[in-house]
Image (spheres, rainbow, N blue to C red):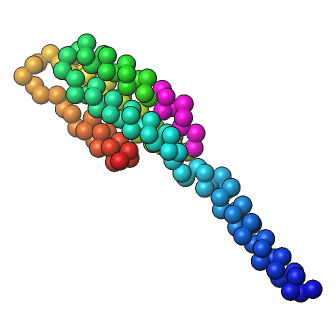
């Protein structure tokens, strides 16, 4: 009888371990989904493309494409890890838009715009979506 109970406990221990580790909410919240990560890479490349545009019309077209990619990524972000990575993408997107607006309103064309905020946001986003 003791042997049967011991075997029952041993066989159920794997099931209990799986339930405790894999089904815990913190385990799911710490993992970035692959679909979001792929859409984040696409959004990152489109934001970089918008940043590298030369004309205002080209910038507007590329920003619209980047906005669409960001919207798709936002809809697939479900876990807390997805939300954190989406926040980095959004920070980069806002920095690019702000930098473009400041470049347009710069009254002194001889003064070079400060790209430090955009470069820092780009570095953080690229490190996240490698």
Question: Which residue is at the far top?
Answer: 57
72 within the magenta span: yes
Provide residue 99's location: percent of width, then percent of height. 26, 26
Position of residue 44 in the picture relative to residue 74 (left or right): left
Question: Residue visible at 50% across and 45% down?
Answer: 34
Question: Which residue is at the far left?
Answer: 110
27 within the magenta span: no
- Image quadrant where one finds the N terminus: bottom right
Provide residue 73's location: percent of width, then percent of height. 48, 33
Q: Is residue 91 visible?
A: no
Position of residue 4 in the picture relative to residue 88 (left or right): right
Position of residue 69 in the picture relative to residue 8 (left or right): left
Question: Residue visible at 22% across and 28% down?
Answer: 52
Task: Determine the main secondary structure of the stretch shown in magenta.
Answer: helix
Q: Is residue 65 visible?
A: yes
The magenta stretch is 71-79
Provide residue 107's location: percent of width, then percent of height. 15, 16
Q: Nearer the viewer, residue 27 or 118?
A: 27
Provide residue 32's location: percent of width, then percent of height. 51, 47
| Above-or-below relation of 13 to 21 | below
Question: Which residue is at the far bottom?
Answer: 2
Q: Nearer the viewer, residue 100 or 42?
A: 42
How many numbered badges does the structure rendering display? 0
| Above-or-below relation of 72 to 56 | below
- Toward which corner of the image does residue 10 lie, by quadrant? bottom right
Question: Which residue is at the far right?
Answer: 1
Position of residue 5 in the picture relative to residue 91 (left or right): right
| Above-or-below relation of 63 to 30 | above
Question: Residue visible at 78% across and 74% down?
Answer: 11
- Toward which corner of the image does residue 110 lie, by quadrant? top left
């Amino acid at each position: 009888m003791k042997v049967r109970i011991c075997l029952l406990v041993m066989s159920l221990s794997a099931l209990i371990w799986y339930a405790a580790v894999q089904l815990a909410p913190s385990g799911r919240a710490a993992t970035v989904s692959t679909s979001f990560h792929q859409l984040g890479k696409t959004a990152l490349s489109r934001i970089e493309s918008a940043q590298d545009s030369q004309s205002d019309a080209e910038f507007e077209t590329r920003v619209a494409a980047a906005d669409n990619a960001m919207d798709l990524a936002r809809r697939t972000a479900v876990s807390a890890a997805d939300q954190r990575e989406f926040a980095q993408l959004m920070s980069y997107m806002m920095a690019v838009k702000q930098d473009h607006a400041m470049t347009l309103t710069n009254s002194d064309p001889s003064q070079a715009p400060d790209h430090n905020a955009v470069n820092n946001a780009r570095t953080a986003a690229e490190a996240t979506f490698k």
